[in-house]
Image (spheres, helix red, strand yellow):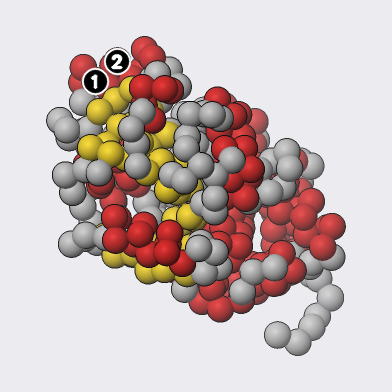
Amino acid sequence: MKITVIGDGGWGTANAMLLAGYGHDVTLWGAFPEYIEEMRRTRKNEKFLKGVTLPENLNLESDRAKAVAGAEVVVLAPPSKFFTSVAETFKGLIAKDMLVVSITKGLCEKTNRRMTDLGAEILGTGPIVALAGPTHAEEVSRGIPTAIVAACEDAAKAKRVQEIWSGPKFRVYTSSDPVGVEIGGAVKNVLAISVGCSDGMGFGDNTRAALITRGLVEMKRFVLAYGGLEETLNGLAGIGDLIVTCTSVHSRNHSVGERLGKGEKIEDILGSMQMVAEGVWNSKVVHEIAKKLGVEMPICEMVYAICYKGLSAADAAKAVMERRLKAE
């Protein structure tokens, strides 16, 4: 099967490696010809996925038309901030009946929309499958056992993705709730920043557990208001992804929060990073949607204030702890 992955970041590369490992004809597209040529020469993606060797049967391409020519499956993997602009450049190149999968976690910064919803409109395709869960590219690329969920309104498409992606060390479940899966994938990144702030300030396990647990409550409120299913968040795209993003050494969002907790400024942190921390951008989107929908999300609100309003992590922690007392 010919598969094209659009986006040569860490997660796009890990998926391309996984699928190439099954014997599929996989092409990984990147926007910068010079870097694609470097990857061809070195068989490495040191900028976004250090320490792994790209399989020899993985094709690398910077030409859009060549990348998607003859593809049966297209995987959308750009960061959420660039999802719209990248998708626009592939408009007219992807057939309406093609199976399209989004592995981008986050919400559109400009429109506040979900990636599958936005992608289907831009590309003119049918429903797009959302593939998300507790998955670090660093581990998937090294063959560490992983479970994930494929969600789509079209059950046949979700099932097809399940069959294509599943293997000895990569297990895929299906869901009919892309809203819950995608919202979970966006909000958990914001919450991971809060846990990182806590760790950076030297707080302990009690604080971390409280933030994750109460963060899950905020996530469920948000999903219900947005039109998703609460039970979706009891699975891999909710609790699963929240745990791994809030506790792992691989989590860029946790790392950003940790540095904020130690007193660094957000501008300096982002300026020093090559990789993307989706939670920073998505804290603003979540703030705007929550305000519009009337959803109470105090932890996410504090992350937004830290990232965009200059609030210190210490003052944010004080504000959360001194809120009006209430029943659980």
Q: Secondary structure at mark 2?
A: helix
- Left or right for 311, reference 31: right
Lateral position of residue 97 relative to residue 37, left or right: right
Q: Residue 206 location, x and y as percent? A: 54, 73
Is the C-beta separation of discs 2 and 1 under 8 Å?
yes
Front residue of 259/170: it is 170
- Report the amino acid beneath label 2: Glu
Q: Amino acid at mark 1?
A: Arg
> Label 2 vs label 1: CA separation?
5 Å
Q: Is 3 situated above or below 86?
A: below
Residue at coordinates 69% horizontally, 72% vertically from top-left?
224
In this view, the residue in front, 72 or 30, is 72
Position of residue 98 measured from the top left corner of the image (x, y, whole percent):
43, 44
Residue at 18 percent across and 49 percent down: it is: 22
On the image, the x and y values in percent for residue 285 come to 72, 48
Position of the N terminus, as image quadrant, is top left
300 left or right, relative to 262? right
Q: Residue at x 50, y 63 (%)?
A: 154
- Asked whether, in this view, residue 288 is left or right of residue 117, the answer is right
Q: Which mark is residue 40?
A: 1
Q: List the residue tagged with mark 2.
A: 37
Other-residue count near label 1 (Cα within 10 Å), few / some / many at <14 / 14–19 / ≥20: some
